[in-house]
Image: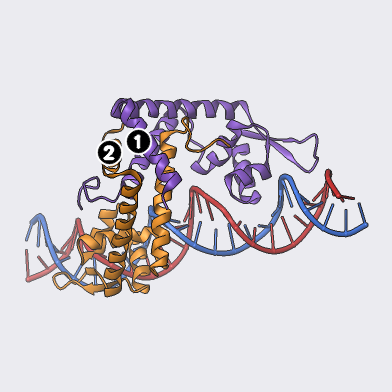
Chain colours: A purple, B orange, C blue, D red
Amino acid sequence: MPDPTDDRTPTPRLLSLAYNKTSAVIYQHLQESGITDTRPSHGNVMEHLAFEDGLRLNDLATRAGITPQSMGQFVDELEDLGYVERRPDLDDRRAKRIHLTRKGKRSNQVEWKVIGEVEAALETLLGKKRLGDLRKALATITDSLS
Amino acid sequence: MPDPTDDRTPTPRLLSLAYNKTSAVIYQHLQESGITDTRPSHGNVMEHLAFEDGLRLNDLATRAGITPQSMGQFVDELEDLGYVERRPDLDDRRAKRIHLTRKGKRSNQVEWKVIGEVEAALETLLGKKRLGDLRKALATITDSLS
DNA sequence: CTGATTATCAGGTATACCTGACTATTTTGT
DNA sequence: ACAAAATAGTCAGGTATACCTGATAATCAG
């Protein structure tokens, strides 16, 4: 098998390898910080609540682009694990508001800390300018490739 | 939800978004080229055979880092779809050699053509230098991040 | 009071793997 | 030369993840 990062390696594969590497590092740091029971898909819930706590299930589902039933499953799991809780919506008795618990907030803080550490490691590795260029190139690809 | 490619977006997320974009484009081009029946995991088989046709099942499994049973499943599927075929190994009657069929070879050619088109689109988008810098940065992350 | 909306219950599908047990061979050690 | 051990592949069945559809009860809005 040839060197997977040689000149002929397709750029999409380089993107995948680099992404896998960073997420492996993040995963490892999270494990070391004692967050061992959440899965990637739980991010669908946690990251939206980090921006706006107390969203309704349907809003979460819409934002994540999945069905309310699927979102309900993730919320069930996170509720069992103690990261979120359902509270009644006082204005609409059909609805429930999904809130982060203390554990959920702490977990989000740890995740952001870990992400910050990886960001710092990338800056050490590449330097400020090259990291900035990388981020710009990635944003350009995401926004403009067709 | 904030702009997913703003300044605060974690670099791993930018990597993931950019990768998803490129692979969506590749997937779409493959569909348009009439390759609609293979799944990403079949790449485990196809790409290794592209480099070295006639590998044994166990060699493929080792190279892909999965069990021979799992590799057997992918080979079964690709054989049913007509992309590969099992031929006896004349030197070892336990073993079989996995070969690309004409259809399999043509499919690999189409995939490389599509990958080439995406590579060209990236070069148009970023320019030769910035694409080269991007690739270098990605390789550095893959090889050196810890 | 009819129709839409919120959430949930029940059950299903696709993907990408895995383990354990087995047969047919080949290789190894005596 | 030959028994024991290793190897190649397959059969059967299982697990985890990330979704989905359809149906239904409660509630709200016009």
Q: Nearer the viewer, residue A111 or A6?
A: A6
Q: Are marks 2 and 1 on the same chain?
A: no
Residue A28's place in the image compared with A6, above or below, is: above
User: What residue is drawn where x is 46% and y is 30%?
Assistant: B7
Which of the 4 image quarters holds residue A45?
top right
Give, as a three-letter code, the residue at label 2: Asp
> Which element is circle 1 on?
helix
User: What residue is drawn where x is 15% and y is 73%?
Assistant: B90
Q: Nearer the viewer, residue C28 or A3?
A: A3
| Residue at mark 2 | B133
For the residue carrying disc 1, how many other residues have a C-alpha within 10 Å: few (<14), some (14-19), or many (20+)? many
Q: Please say whether residue A83 is visible from this viewpoint.
A: no
How many labels sit on residues?
2
Query: Residue B141 appears at what percent x and percent y?
Result: 30, 36
Which image quadrant: the N terminus of chain B?
Answer: top right
Q: CA–CA distance between discs 2 and 1? A: 8 Å
Left or right of B121? Residue C9 is right
Residue A103's place in the image compared with C25, above or below, is: above
Query: Residue A68 appears at what percent x and percent y?
Result: 65, 49
Chain under label 1?
A
| Residue at mark 1 | A134
Q: Nearer the viewer, residue D8 or A66?
A: A66
Which of the 4 image quarters holds residue A31?
top left
Q: Are marks 2 and 1 in contact (CB under 8 Å)?
A: yes
